[in-house]
Image: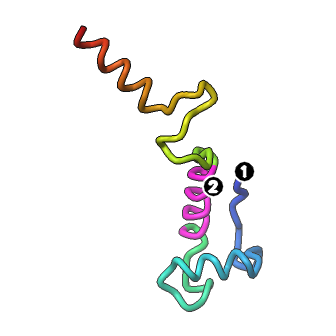
């Protein structure tokens, strides 16, 4: 998903505004600078793009969890 920054508070839909207010220390979306709103939503978008929805210990496409390969690589250093 690609976040498109807001240029003003009027562009923020009510669902997004309600969400922001649940995590912000503010009573109104107007109390939060638009730059802060955009920064928060951009960071959230980047986090969601990086997250594959699986816990870190879950297998990847190769059938092995990431830590298994890292552990194998670590062991090779000491053979």
Residue 21: horizontal and vertical position, in percent? 58, 82
Q: 62 or 40: which is nearer to us?
A: 62
Residue 4 quadrant: bottom right
- Whether 34 is drawn above or below 68: the answer is below
According to the image, label 1 marks what residue?
2
Q: How is the image coloured?
A: rainbow
Q: Secondary structure at mark 1?
A: loop
Residue 24 forms part of the magenta stretch: no
Residue 27: horizontal and vertical position, in percent? 55, 91
According to the image, label 2 marks what residue?
45
Evaluate if marks 1 and 2 touch, with contact meaning CB atoms under 8 Å apart: yes
Return the residue found at the far bottom.
27
Q: Secondary structure at mark 2?
A: helix
Return the residue found at the far top.
79
Q: Is residue 16 left or right of residue 73?
A: right
Could you tell which of marks 1 and 2 lies nearer the N-terminus? 1
Residue range highlighted in magenta: 36-48
Q: Is the C terminus in the top left, top right, bottom left or bottom right quadrant? A: top left
Q: CA distance from mark 1 to mark 2?
A: 7 Å
Residue 73 quadrant: top left
- Whether 2 is drawn above or below 77: the answer is below
| Dominant secondary structure, magenta | helix
């Amino acid at each position: 998903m690609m976040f498109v920054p807001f240029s003003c508070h009027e562009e923020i839909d009510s669902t997004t505004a309600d969400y922001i207010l649940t995590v912000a220390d503010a009573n109104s979306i107007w109390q939060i600078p638009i730059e802060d709103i955009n920064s928060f939503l951009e960071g959230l978008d980047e986090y969601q793009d990086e997250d594959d929805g699986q816990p870190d210990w879950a297998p990847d496409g190769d059938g092995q969890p990431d830590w298994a390969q890292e552990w194998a690589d670590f062991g090779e250093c000491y053979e």
